[in-house]
Amino acid sequence: MNPLDPLDAAMMTAEMLSNPMHVGAVLILSPPPGAGPEYVDELYRETQAGNDPIDPRLRRYPHQGVDTGGIWVWRDADTVDIGQHCQRRTVSADDAGFWRLIAELDAERLDRSRPMWMSYLIDGLEDGRFAFYIKVHHTVIDGVAGFKMIAEALSTDADRRSMPPSTPSITGNARRRRRRPGCCIGWPHRCGRWSGRPHPGSGW
């Protein structure tokens, strides 16, 4: 068994009694110059068809039961359904409607029976912009590490599809320092597939 450390186990237990324990990020992007009206559709199709390896942290899910003696442990999913974890939404050009959608998505608890992360590609924003909203349980990755992962995976070059591996972290507690070199190659494979120019207001 691969037990959760005490802090993460406490978060899992506390979540049953209080608010969701995930962190979230919103990225608001513009298509690159010359992009056609089908640009976001093409990005989403590429994401669904991706066969790149997924970060090991995004393949596991928590489990607690009689078979574990009541302790929280990590289990690895045999497969990760990208169609389930990477979804598509469309909103009107109204900013208020967009942020209402973000609030609704953020309020939903992550399903503990599968890897605890979700991402949404959202189009329909004003001036042809689109957005990327992602949420990950805090036991999987914290806000600082998550921002670093996304920052390394994004590209301002719309033709760039391959991202360099992430470098091991030298900050944070021991479990977040001991990352395997190259384990993170994008979000969830290569977030560079969803490339564009960031706008003010994007953030974690």
Image: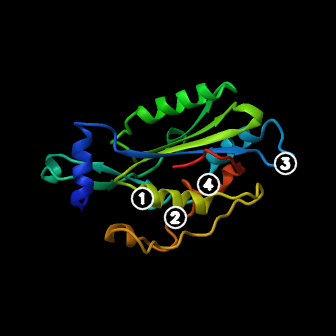
Badge number at residue 57: 1
Residue under circle 3? 33
The amino acid type of the residue labelled 4 equals Cys
- Earlier in the chain: of badge 4 and badge 2, it is 2
Relative depth, front residue between 51 and 38: 38
Q: Secondary structure at mark 4?
A: helix
Relative depth, front residue between 138 and 50: 138
Badge number at residue 191: 4
The amino acid type of the residue labelled 2 equals Cys
Relative depth, front residue between 23 and 202: 202
Horizontal arrangement in the rendering, residue 27 relative to residue 103 (left or right): right
CB contact under 8 Å: marks 2 and 1: yes
Residue 190 x, y percent position in the rendering: 61, 57
Residue 49 x, y percent position in the rendering: 64, 47
Residue 109 x, y percent position in the rendering: 37, 36
Q: Quadrant of residue 161?
A: bottom right
Q: Secondary structure at mark 3?
A: loop
**Which residue lies at the image location 64% right of the left edge and 40% below the top edge?**
131
User: Taking 53 as reference, is 110 above or below it?
Assistant: above
The answer to whether residue 192 is seen in the rendering is: yes
Q: Residues within 10 Å of mark 4 (few under 14, many from 20)?
A: many
Q: Residues within 10 Å of mark 1 (few under 14, many from 20)?
A: some
Marks 3 and 1, how far apart in space? 35 Å
Residue under circle 2? 184
